[in-house]
Amino acid sequence: MDFKLSDEQKMIQKLARDFSRNEIAPVAEHYDKTHEFPWPVVEKAQELGLIVMGIPEEYGGLGFSLFEEVLVAEELGWGCAGISTIIYNSTLGILPIILFGTDAQKEKYFAKMVDGDLASYCLTESEAGSDVAGIRSAAQKDGDDYILNGSKTFITGAITSSFYTVFAYTDMEKRYKGISCFIVERDWDGVSVGKPLEKMGQNASDTAEVIFENVRVPAENLIGQEGEGFMISMKVFDYSRPCNSSAAVGVAQRAYEESVRYASERQSMGKPIWKHQAIGHMIADMAMQIEAARLLVWKSAWSVDSGERNTTAAAFAKGYAADMAMKICVDAVQVFGGYGYMSEYPVEKLMRDVKLYQIYEGTSQIQRNIIAREIFRNK
C-alpha cells in the first residue's frame, strides 16, 4: 500500500475538487433552501462522467477503481452532502448490476446511464431498515415474469431515477435466503412514486417512497439467482460504504477549514480565538480525527481493489467516519459560537447535512454489530 497518489489519481482528485469548488459549493445554499433538484449540477457531472465513474470503460463509463471513486467522493462531499449524494446515488443503484448482472443487463442498463438516466437502490422499507429480513415486498413467479408488490421508503433519487434495483422476497419462508434482486423500470405499469419527504438536511437530494402494485417484471431482470438478494445487498454495501464514508470525511474537512478560517479572523481578548487553548485544541482534534478517518476509508477501498474481503475495513471506515464527521460539525458550530447557529454561516448546514451519514447504508450501531460479528466469527 502506497500513501502517495499516482499522477492519474492526482488528476482525478483535482477534477473532482475543481468541480466541487466551482459548480457545487457556490449553489449549495440555494438548493438547500429551495429543496429543488440540482439538475444543472447533475448534468455537468454527467458531462464529466462522474455519474458513471464505476461503470467499466467498455460500456462507456470511466472504469474507476474503488480507490479513485473514494477520492472523488471526498471532494464532492466537501461541496455539498446533498448534491454529492445525488451524484453518487446512481453508482449505488447500478452496483448490483456491476457486481452480479448478466452481460445483457449490463449492456442495456449501463447504456441507459451513459445516455443520462439515473438509478436508485431500493432496499429500505417502513418496517425494515437495519433488519433486511424484515422487508415485506414480494415477487411471485408467473410464467416468464414475476409479479412484484410492496413499497420502499427513504429512497434517494426515487423521483428522478428511471430505473431501480429492488429487493423483494421470492420465498418468504426462507427469510434471508429467500430475498431476490430485480431491475425495475420507473415507467412500467404499477410503479408509482410518492411526494418528496421533508428532511433535516441534504435537501438537494430527493427522497421519496416507491410503490409497486402488481408490477410485471421479466425474469430476465432478475439479478443473480433467486435467493441471492441478501448476499447481493451485503456485497454492495462493502463497495458503497467506502465512498459514503469518504463523503463524510469531505463534509468534516469543509467544517474544519471553515473553523480554521473563522478562528484565525475572529478576535477575543485581544487575540485570534485559535490562540485560546480551548479552541486551538478543538481544531487540532479535528485535524487528527479527519486524518485517521481518511486512512480508514482509503484502506477499505484499497482492500477491494486488491481483491481482499473488506467487510470489517468498510465497517471501520463507515462507523468511524460518520461519527467523526458529526462531532466535527457540531464542534465547528461551537467554534463559530452564536454565528454558527445562524443559517448565513455554512457550518449550520454542514451539521444538518452530516447527521444522515450516521444513519443510511447501515447505522453507526449496525457497523459495530458487523465489527463484533467479524471479531468473533472464528472464535
Image (tube, rainbow, N blue to C red):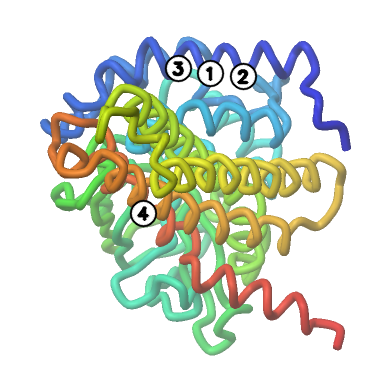
| Amino acid identity at mark 2 | Gln
| Cα distance in 3D space between marks 4 and 3 | 25 Å
- Which mark, by number, is residue 153? none
**To which residue does mark 1 refer?**
16
Q: Quadrant of the N terminus?
A: top right
Residue found 53% across the figure and 80% down from its top: 171
Across and down, in percent, residue 212 comes to 30, 60
> Helix, strand or loop at disc 2?
helix
Among the 4 quarters of the image, the one containing residue 255? top left
Horizontal placement of 221 versus 203: left or right? right
- Residue with the mark numbered 2: 13
Frontmost residue, 126 versus 314: 314
Q: Mark 4 or mark 3: which comes first in sequence?
A: 3
User: Earlier along the polypeptide chain: callout 1 or callout 4?
Assistant: 1
- What secondary structure is found at the residue carrying circle 3? helix
Q: Between marks 1 and 4, how big is the CA–CA gap? A: 22 Å
As displayed, is residue 8 above or below residue 212? above
Residue at point 40% right, 49% down?
278
Callout 4: SS: helix
Cα–Cα span, label 4 and label 2: 24 Å
Residue corresponding to mark 4: 356
Choose between 134 and 271: the one closer to the eye. 271
Secondary structure under badge 1?
Answer: helix
Q: Position of residue 174 (x, y in %)?
A: 59, 86
Mark closer to the chain start, 4 or 2: 2
